[in-house]
Structures are given as structure tokens and as C-alpha cells.
């Protein structure tokens, strides 16, 4: 399978209710789009949530790092590409590229996912599921940002607090 067939490309528009007061897409909406792209891509390759749920498995996002040069403006069309960079026994690395209306890459994201059993809540062995078929979708497409790492907590005292209010 060629790398072109391993990359999924999904088109979006920055709707008025998806932008902030500056007219740019919000980070929360971009995050939703990234999750949807991961789901679309996995589904197209037989590893989507619906198929996994039949066997009592599901995907869990473990880490996500995003680096952007710019966000799309209101009503702008843009695309998100996604691909699988690596598959390990318990985790898989999935990358994303944000592409503006001119076709220029304006940001990247890296994510780490685990598949867990919904019965035991323990990770599944990705290399044995479907006879290791997920390995067929590994792609060599470069992603120029650093891999997300664990955040090391050195203090148990909160730095600040935020009171959630209904709005």
C-alpha cells in the first residue's frame, strides 16, 4: 500500500459558531476536528469505534501536542490530514497536518492512543488484534514537531484555581 493511501484528508469550513472574537477557529473546535479525523481514518481502515465496540474495545487518547502558525478565519475552507506514524504493542502514534485554503501546511499535531478493553479497562495488544493488520497503515510522512511527553508533576499544591460557572 502506498503512503498516499495511508493518509486521510478531510475538508472543513470555519463556521461562524466555531470562531472566537478575532474571527479565527478556536482551539477547542480544532481539537474536535482532529478527533473526528482520527475516527474517520480509523473507520475507513477497519479500526473505528463502531467495529471495536462490537468486540468490547475502544480507543483512548493518551497525549496530544499541537503546534500552529495560524488558524483558519471564519468561512475559510481548510483540510486536516492524518496518518499513523508508529504502532507499538500498547500504543499507536497518530499525526495530523492542518492545511489552509492555499494548500500550505499551517500546523501539526501529534497524538498517542491506546486501545482498551471496555470490560477490563486494560490496554489491548495492538500487534495481535486483527492479526496485526494495523501495521499495514504505518506511514513515513514526516511530522516536524516534537512527540508529546508525560507531564511530570513535582508539587501537590495547586498553582491556581478556576471556578466553573454556567454561561
Image (spheres, rainbow, N blue to C red):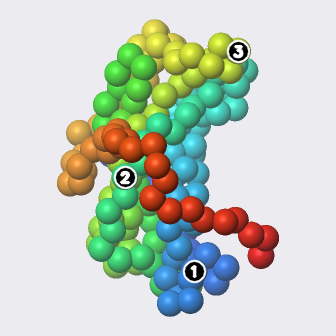
Residue at image location 57% in from the left, 22% down from the top:
116
Residue 53 quadrant: top right
Q: Is residue 10 above or below residue 46?
A: below
Q: Where residue 76 appears, x then y in whole percent?
A: 50, 82
Of callouts 1 and 2, the N-terminal one: 1
Q: Position of residue 65 (x, y in %)?
A: 37, 52
Q: Relative to 98, say whether 53 is above or below.
A: above
Tell me where residue 127 sits by quadrant: top left
Q: Let me know if residue 84 appears in the view.
A: no
Read off the residue under disc 1.
19
Q: Residue 155, can we see it?
A: yes
Work out whether residue 77 or residue 85 is closer to the camera in this orientation and state it: 85
Residue at image x 27%, y 44%?
147
Q: Position of residue 51 (x, y in %)?
A: 66, 27
- Of the pair 73 and 64, the residue shown nearer to us: 64
> Gap between marks 1 and 2, in whole Å?
21 Å
> Dot 3, how many residues are within 10 Å of its Cα: few (below 14), some (14-19), or many (20+)?
few
User: Residue at point 50% right, 68% down?
Assistant: 27
Residue 119 is tagged as: 3
Lower sequence index among marks 3 and 1: 1
Which class describes the residues within 10 Å of circle 2: few (<14), some (14-19), or many (20+)?
Answer: some
Q: Earlier in the sequence, mark 3 or mark 2?
A: 2
The residue at 34%/42% (across/down) is 154
The residue that label 2 is drawn on is 65
- Residues at discs 3 and 2 in contact (Cβ within 8 Å): no
Amino acid at each position: 500500500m502506498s503512503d498516499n493511501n495511508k493518509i486521510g484528508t478531510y475538508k472543513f469550513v470555519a463556521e461562524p459558531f466555531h470562531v472566537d472574537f478575532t474571527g479565527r477557529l478556536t482551539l477547542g473546535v480544532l481539537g474536535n476536528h482532529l478527533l473526528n479525523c482520527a475516527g474517520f481514518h480509523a473507520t475507513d481502515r477497519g479500526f473505528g469505534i463502531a467495529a471495536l465496540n462490537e468486540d468490547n474495545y475502544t480507543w483512548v487518547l493518551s497525549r496530544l501536542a499541537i503546534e500552529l502558525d495560524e488558524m483558519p478565519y471564519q468561512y475559510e475552507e481548510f483540510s486536516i490530514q492524518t496518518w499513523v506514524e508508529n504502532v507499538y504493542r500498547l500504543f499507536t502514534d497518530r499525526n495530523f497536518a492542518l492545511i489552509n485554503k492555499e494548500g500550505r501546511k499551517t500546523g501539526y499535531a501529534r497524538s498517542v492512543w491506546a486501545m482498551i478493553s471496555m470490560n477490563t479497562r486494560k490496554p489491548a495488544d495492538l500487534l495481535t488484534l486483527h492479526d496485526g493488520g494495523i501495521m499495514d497503515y504505518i506511514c513515513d510522512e514526516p511530522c516536524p514537531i516534537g512527540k508529546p511527553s508525560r507531564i511530570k508533576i513535582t508539587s501537590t499544591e495547586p498553582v491556581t484555581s478556576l471556578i466553573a460557572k454556567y454561561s
